[in-house]
Image: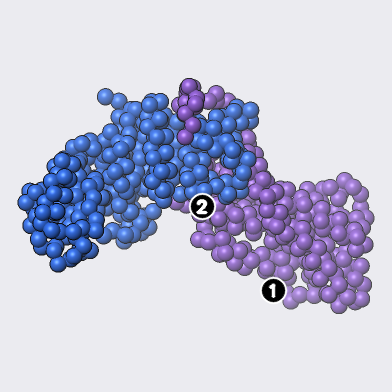
Chain colours: A blue, B purple
């Protein structure tokens, strides 16, 4: 089996050797060629640090990593020839036009000016930016900027692509567009490492998911396997009358087979086996006379995944680079 | 997303690669072009090398000139113009560090670091682009000086040599600004630190008054100050006088500045996360 990305025991500490922030504390990651590896975790878990090491921007303190079979420290220059990186903050030059941004990258990748222009036009068309090609990137919307940024990382036709939270801050429609792009990349044979804070996103795109928390991998599985562990879907209900919370708790425990968790906002959430429970729940609520303000069936949020995996509510707010 | 292309352009054949020779130079020129496009889009970035020289010339010649040169403003113009040129290139270098600092904060340099180009290329490119700022400044100083009555009394070759020397020194000196730009936490801090350095260097020199009017301890500083020697060499080349000695000093300083600050800047760039 060929791995396009392999990392073993990566550690990285920022700042002082003893008091600094330990961003990575021995992370192992692996992605087979032509697949999507989803790296799921909250802010400050170490996702960005791991990506920056794999993309040769920074060196690990210990551990080793290979991308396309090349060592990211000793063969960094060769790794850079085969990777594309799209960071969390769209790193395009705002004072340049869309075309100028991409042509510049092409020329830095040793294309001739003519080749670079052809490539830029191709990518701009593919990302639906042809009309905005001659406008300065500072006039672009958030979604357009992300697409230009992603286009910039694809100029050199990389075989391994790192996408660091590519959809954070995008509205749902734009998010779906970005997902289509990722699927297209993989169809074309690329390997993608994608970091995200949304299980829904990892579920939609990834072949395998590594869940990381405070610099550790706390779970690694297929989306299917992970959902089996954390519960396939969650049913969330908010009664109109908070006084009926106890009655609702009993009712949900009965139909779902496990005790629902209160979240402190007069809302109950319970893990359910399948969506077949939805009509049952609606019928039972009706006959019990419980009116609801909110009723939804959804994949677990990152918070719920963490609650299941670690048994604690994740409160990490600080961002480790 | 458009899906009209049969063969999606995302992952086809690898780009043709060219021999590695002169790649650093070519990449630096590509990145220099980027800086020039940005300057072209925001011409107000050129105020410090266009309007500022004009204002400084007027202020120094007409406010201080009479007092310093006992009434002869023309005589002071002759003396002070090469001095202001020396001060101007030192001040003109500040923007370079500030822009680098801002660029890095925006994450654009992450992109450059993930590309198979020399680590130094973005820095060298930014310095190349500054060449045009310094050239502009020299033209403005000499051009506006001519309007005020300044005349180069040597010959055209010496005048060209004076400009070349000034720009050459500027391109060496500006590596201090590059280094500070990479070390400082904010663009504002870059300016503060650079002026702390530039003010004593430019005023504690032969720029504005004759050195023999200063106390001994200050003269000792002035006599090793690179700005003194640059200004001395430019004066010699433009209106006559000793050239060899200040020229040797200036070349020595240029070599020293490059030898120290280029490696420092590269190291700071590698370490900057």
Residue B80 image offset from top left, x and y in percent = 83, 65
Chain bearing tag 1 is: B
- In this view of the protein, which residue sits in the foreground, A169 or A257? A257
**Residue designated by label 1:** B217
Instruction: Point out the frontmost of discs 1 and 2.
Output: 2
Q: Is residue B25 left or right of residue B85?
A: left
Nearer to me, B131 or B266: B131
- Residue B219, by quadrant, is bottom right
Is the residue marked by circle 1 packed among few (<14), some (14-19), or many (20+) residues within 10 Å? Answer: few
Which circle's residue, 1 or 2, is located before the other in the chain? 2
User: What residue is rendered at 42% in x and 38% in y?
Assistant: A177
> Can the viewer see residue B229?
no
* Point 35% across, 37% down: residue: A193
* Subunit that carries the residue with mark 2: B
Residue that label 2 marks: B106
- Local SS, label 2: loop
Q: Which mark is residue B271?
A: none
The spot of residue B47 in percent (x, y) is: 73, 59
Residue name at image x 51 percent, y 40 percent: A148
């Amino acid at each position: 089996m060929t791995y396009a990305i392999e990392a073993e025991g990566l550690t990285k500490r920022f700042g002082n050797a003893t008091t600094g922030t330990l961003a990575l504390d021995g992370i192992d990651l692996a992605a087979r060629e032509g697949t999507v590896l989803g790296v799921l975790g909250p802010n400050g878990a170490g996702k960005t640090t791991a990506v920056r090491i794999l993309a040769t921007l920074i060196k690990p303190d210990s551990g080793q990593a290979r991308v396309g079979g090349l060592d990211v420290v000793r063969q960094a220059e060769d790794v850079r020839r085969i990777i594309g990186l799209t960071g969390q903050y769209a790193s395009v030059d705002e004072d340049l036009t869309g075309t100028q941004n991409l042509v510049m990258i092409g020329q830095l990748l040793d294309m001739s000016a003519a080749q670079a222009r052809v490539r830029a036009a191709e990518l701009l068309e593919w990302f639906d930016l042809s009309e905005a090609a001659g406008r300065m990137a500072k006039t672009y919307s958030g979604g357009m900027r992300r697409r230009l940024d992603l286009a910039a990382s694809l100029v050199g036709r990389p075989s391994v692509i790192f996408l660091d939270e590519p959809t954070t801050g995008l509205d749902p429609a734009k998010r779906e567009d970005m997902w289509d792009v990722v699927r297209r990349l993989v169809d074309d044979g690329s390997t993608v490492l994608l970091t995200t804070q949304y299980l829904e996103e990892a579920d939609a795109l990834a072949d395998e998911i590594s869940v990381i928390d405070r610099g550790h991998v706390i779970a690694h599985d297929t989306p299917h396997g992970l959902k089996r562990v954390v519960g396939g879907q969650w049913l969330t209900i908010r009664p109109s009358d908070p006084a009926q919370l106890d009655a609702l708790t009993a009712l949900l425990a009965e139909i779902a087979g496990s005790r629902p968790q209160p979240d402190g906002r007069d809302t109950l959430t319970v893990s359910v086996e399948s969506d077949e429970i939805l009509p049952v729940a609606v019928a039972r609520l009706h006959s019990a006379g419980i009116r609801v303000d909110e009723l939804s069936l959804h994949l677990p949020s990152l918070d719920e995944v963490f609650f299941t995996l670690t048994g604690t509510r994740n409160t990490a707010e600080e961002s480790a680079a | 997303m458009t899906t009209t292309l049969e063969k999606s352009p995302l992952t086809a054949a690898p780009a043709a690669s060219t021999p590695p020779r002169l790649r650093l130079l070519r990449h630096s020129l590509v990145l220099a072009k980027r800086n020039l496009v940005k300057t072209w889009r925001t011409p107000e970035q050129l105020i410090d090398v266009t309007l500022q020289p004009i204002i400084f010339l007027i202020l120094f010649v007409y406010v201080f000139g009479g007092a310093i040169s006992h009434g002869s403003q023309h005589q002071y113009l002759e003396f002070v113009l090469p001095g202001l040129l020396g001060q101007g290139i030192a001040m003109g270098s500040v923007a370079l560090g500030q822009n680098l600092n801002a660029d890095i904060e925006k994450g654009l340099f992450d992109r450059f670091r993930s590309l198979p180009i020399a680590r130094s290329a973005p820095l060298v490119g930014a310095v190349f682009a500054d060449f045009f700022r310094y050239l502009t400044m020299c033209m403005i100083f000499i051009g506006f000086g001519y309007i005020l009555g300044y005349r180069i009394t040597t010959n055209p070759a010496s005048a060209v040599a004076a400009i070349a020397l000034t720009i050459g020194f500027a391109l060496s000196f500006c590596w201090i600004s590059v280094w500070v730009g990479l070390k400082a936490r904010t663009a504002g801090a870059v300016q503060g630190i650079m002026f702390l350095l530039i003010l004593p260097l430019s005023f504690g020199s032969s720029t504005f008054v004759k050195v023999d009017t200063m106390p001994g301890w200050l003269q000792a500083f002035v006599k090793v100050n690179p700005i003194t020697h640059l200004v001395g060499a430019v004066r010699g080349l433009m209106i006559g006088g000793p050239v060899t000695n200040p020229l040797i000093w200036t070349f020595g300083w240029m070599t020293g500045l490059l030898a120290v600050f280029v490696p420092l800047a590269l190291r700071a760039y590698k370490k900057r996360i």
